[in-house]
Structure formats: structure tokens, C-alpha cells
Image (cartoon, coloured by chain):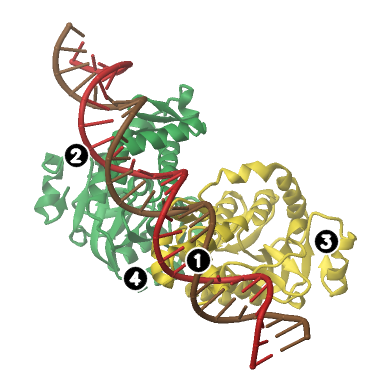
Chain colours: A green, B yellow, C brown, D red
Amino acid sequence: MLKKERQAYILHQVNLHNKVLSSSLCIDINVSEDTIRRDLQELAEEGKVIKVHGGALSHSFNDVHFPSNGVYSQHQKKTIAQKAISLIDNGMFVLTSGGTTILEMARSLPPQLKATFISGSIPAILEYMHHPNIDVILVGDRISKNSKITVGTEAIAKIKQVRADICFLGTNAIDLQHGITDNDWEVVQLKKAMMDSSQKVVCLAIAEKVNTFQPIQIAALEKIDILITELPPDDPILKPYADAGIKVL
Amino acid sequence: MLKKERQAYILHQVNLHNKVLSSSLCIDINVSEDTIRRDLQELAEEGKVIKVHGGALSHSFNDVHFPSNGVYSQHQKKTIAQKAISLIDNGMFVLTSGGTTILEMARSLPPQLKATFISGSIPAILEYMHHPNIDVILVGDRISKNSKITVGTEAIAKIKQVRADICFLGTNAIDLQHGITDNDWEVVQLKKAMMDSSQKVVCLAIAEKVNTFQPIQIAALEKIDILITELPPDDPILKPYADAGIKVL
DNA sequence: CAAATTCCTGCACAAAAACGCAGAAACCGG
DNA sequence: CCGGTTTCTGCGTTTTTGTGCAGGAATTTG
């Protein structure tokens, strides 16, 4: 990996998460801490970041900026993202839906990962685009402004042409009786198609979505291979899902 | 392999993957590292790539370069955008390419305008999405990271299905002899398809691009209906284009 | 205050760049 | 066809750059 490339990645991470730890960076990029420190120093001299003990901060974050209520939920999503990423190997074809959990996953993808990501979600695509080694395939069609995702028959037809290794679904609601459910008809159609086109189906859901349901069904529980929440896999809430044959992470 | 041929190949690789390693290039093309380095140096002097230790990067990496000349050029682009917008009426189907000029147009669209915009450019799509009354159709396919636009046969096929009223092309180079030209083969294919699918073809070009040319031709002058620059229509530089039958705004 | 990180300095090694040079190919005007 | 010139390419050699490592200093933390 080239120096500039590394620095661009660091900068992206800093601007994204407002902070970065040199320790985690050198694991991510797989270089020595010295290199990271030198990079941070260089970026600091150029005024791109603020170097502090143990890492660096974004310039904008210098002001006391409280990330409102998002913080805790953000942390939960990071946990989910990490678990999800462990399922992705080099060379895979990955289908993803939209949603903030997926977005968090996109942001946390390790830079050395080489894979092909397919999605119709604009925010997710933006993240994938910043990644140095990921090929991005955009599913086209009409854009639904509120979900920021492409919807329609063309999009569905395109997804059906794909044979993906794995599919990550941001999940709005999941319960034992109704399976995974949602409230946007068009998004539901899309997610159905994505499930059909993938060998493995992974649902990402923060715990507060578990055991809730929405009006429209996407799929029954049996269609799900893996369920990821921020809770430990043996949490009693998740027990029924494991019993139903779903692998819980 | 000829020098120009080699450089075109390198440029293509850079535009495709955002980076190239001189080591891998000299294996690919089967020449010495010196030759590659000399090529990269040449391309860097022409501003086509950014040379770094170990290879080269596409311009999209140092986005720091953008804001520098941005201010003045920005004003010119606003002028162009205003002229372009005057061509759009309610109910129209509009095809647009990518590029900063198109982006400026997207930002300046009057909020009451009701129209359908079709594009494969991610930045442009983001702007259209924020507009209250515009329907957005996204052309899907693989994303070229450096031009932030979808490229490939699928994208072209989709565009060919469209019958748009008007098509706006951000133009990298235009001159009397070669017509409009560009340096990315895939983008060229896309723009060709867009022109074929539109009743009217409008070229947006800041004056410094006029009377310059790039290696790959998109279309001859005759295919262009309207040319928009920031200059007044009667500027002597534009006279030959008006004489060639193009409407100059 | 003590332990654990993290940071800095100098150093060594490897990879890449720069430089000069020479052979080969293309170009060209007689 | 033929010398002379220019251009292009590859090969050593030297210089620069990037990276990791080992120590000791500085810092955070409990």
C-alpha cells in the first residue's frame, strides 16, 4: 500500500469518526506503529488532523461537539459491524441493503479487504467508493428519496441476475412469528430479491429491533442464515432464534 | 508496444483503480522500471496522474487540489449553470454526465422545477436527490472510482433504452478539428450513448477547455446542438463554433 | 509513585528514483 | 541508400525515500 493511499485512508477515517487510534490503525493497515505515527505527524504538519497522544482527532471536532443521542447507538452499531465484517473474505461478492447499520459496516471495512460490493443504497455506495480495494457495483433504477436507495423493477431484475456469496440486510424489525418485516413496500421487494440472489443471508439488527414487527413481511425466519446483534450470542433474548436454526453472532 | 499506447494503458489503469504500482506495471507491459517511471513522470507533468513513491494515483485522491482554484472557476461554472438551466422545462427527461460543471448546474436547479433526471454520476445524483420536485433515475453498473460515475456495458445499455429530451455533457476538451474529446475510454463510451439517446445535445465547457483536445474522440462537432461557456455568445473564440452550425449560449 | 503505553531518536535495510551512458530503432534530408 | 540526428529503451551506479527495529525518554493511568 502506498504512502499517500494510507494517508488518504487515515484522513477519511478521521473525518468520519472524528478520532482515530494509532494502535487500531496499524492493525487495520498492517504496518508498524512508527509508520502510522509518521503519517499522523505529516498530516498534522499539513493541518489535516490534530495529533494527540495515542492517535489523532479531526479538526472540526476541536470544538466541543456533542454527538447528541447518537453516541450509544453508534457504539452498538460498531459492534454489529465488526461481527459482520468477520464474515467477509477476500474475493467475495457481497450484496448489501441500506440503513445506518450497513453504513457503519461500510465505514469499518478493513482497507486491505478486496471484494466486490453490490448495492443500491447511495450512502453505502459513497462509503464503498472511498475504500481503496473494493470494486463497487451500483444497482440502478428510480431513487426513492426517503430511503436513499434505488427501487423498482429494473433494480430487482438486476439483483436477480447476481449470484452473491453473502447478503447483509439492515433489519428494521424481526420477530419469531413474522420473521423480518419492514414498512416500505418497495424496499421489501428489493430485500426479497437480494435474499434470493445470495448463498447466505445475514441480518443486522440492534437489539431494540428484535421482537418487534412491521406491516410488510420480507421473509420468514427460516430464510435467514445468520443474525447479528450487539448482544453476546448467548443472550436469552436471542435464544429462540438460535433454537429456530439461525446462527446467532 | 508504442510509447503512447503504453501511456494510454497506464492512464486507463489509473482511472480504473485509482492507483498503479510501477512494479506491477512493468510486469504487465513487460518493460523496464525506468521506462515506466519516465512514462509516469510525463503523465504527471501533463497533470494526468499524481506520481508518488512506488507508483501513481488518480487525482481523486488529493481532493485538496480542488478548493485551490475552485473559487474563481466556481463563478464561471455558475454562469454556465444558469445558462444551462434556462434550457430545462417542466416535465422534461434530462440526461446528464458527471463533472464539476454539471454538479454546479445540479446545485442551481430552481426548486419549483419538476423534471426527471437520469445520470450515473454519484455526486450529481446526490444533488438531484436533495431537490424537492425532481425524479431521479440512477444508471447502474460498476463504479469508476476516479470519475465517480457508473461505467460498463450495462450502463450503456440502460442509457440506450432512454429517449431523453435533452442531454448535458460536462466537456473536458473541445476543438474544431476533433470535436469533443476525453481521456477515459469508458466515460467516452457512456457519453456517446447519452448523445445517441437524446433529442438535443448540450455541451458545457469553461473557456479554458475550448480549443483543446484529448486522446479519445466522443463525437464530431456536428453532433452538438448547443455549446455553453461562461463567455458571451459573441466572443470571437466561439465564432468558429457558431459558424459550424452550433448554437452558442 | 509505579506500571504501562506511547513517543522520539538514531540506525539499518530494502525498495524505488535519479542520473548518466550506450545500444537500438526510427526519422530524415540528401 | 546512407550518414547524421533524434528518440526510445535498458543497464549500472549513486542517491533518496520508506519502513521497521531497538533503546531510552516522556506521557498517561491507576
Residue at the spot 45% in from the left edge and 35% down from the top edge: A42
Q: Label 1 crowding class (10 Å Cα cut-off): few <14, some 14-19, many 20+?
A: many
Q: Chain of mark 2?
A: A
Q: Which residue is mark 1?
A: B10
Q: Secondary structure at mark 4?
A: loop
The lab-note entry on whether marks 2 and 3 share a chain reads no
Q: Chain of mark 1?
A: B
Q: Label 4 crowding class (10 Å Cα cut-off): few <14, some 14-19, many 20+?
A: some
The answer to which of marks 4 and 2 sits earlier in the sequence is 4
Tell me how far mark 2 sits from mark 1, CA to CA.
48 Å
Q: Amino acid at mark 3?
A: Leu
Q: Are marks 4 and 3 in contact (CB under 8 Å)?
A: no
Q: Label 3 crowding class (10 Å Cα cut-off): few <14, some 14-19, many 20+?
A: some
Measuring from the top left, give residue A246's x and y in whole percent.
15, 55
Q: Secondary structure at mark 3?
A: loop
Apparent side of residue A93 relative to residue B203 in the rendered image (left or right): left
Q: Nearer the viewer, mark 4 or mark 3?
A: 3
Tell me how far mark 4 sits from mark 1, CA to CA.
30 Å
Apparent side of residue B87 relative to residue A12 in the rendered image (left or right): right
The lab-note entry on whether marks 3 and 1 share a chain reads yes
Measuring from the top left, give residue A231's x and y in whole percent.
19, 39
Q: Chain of mark 4?
A: A
Q: Which residue is mark 2?
A: A231
Q: Which residue is mark 3?
A: B249
Residue at the spot 26% in from the left edge and 50% down from the top edge: A85
Q: Amino acid at mark 2?
A: Leu
Apparent side of residue A13 relative to residue B204 in the rendered image (left or right): left
B52, A173: nearer the viewer: B52
Q: Which residue is mark 4?
A: A162
Q: Chain of mark 3?
A: B
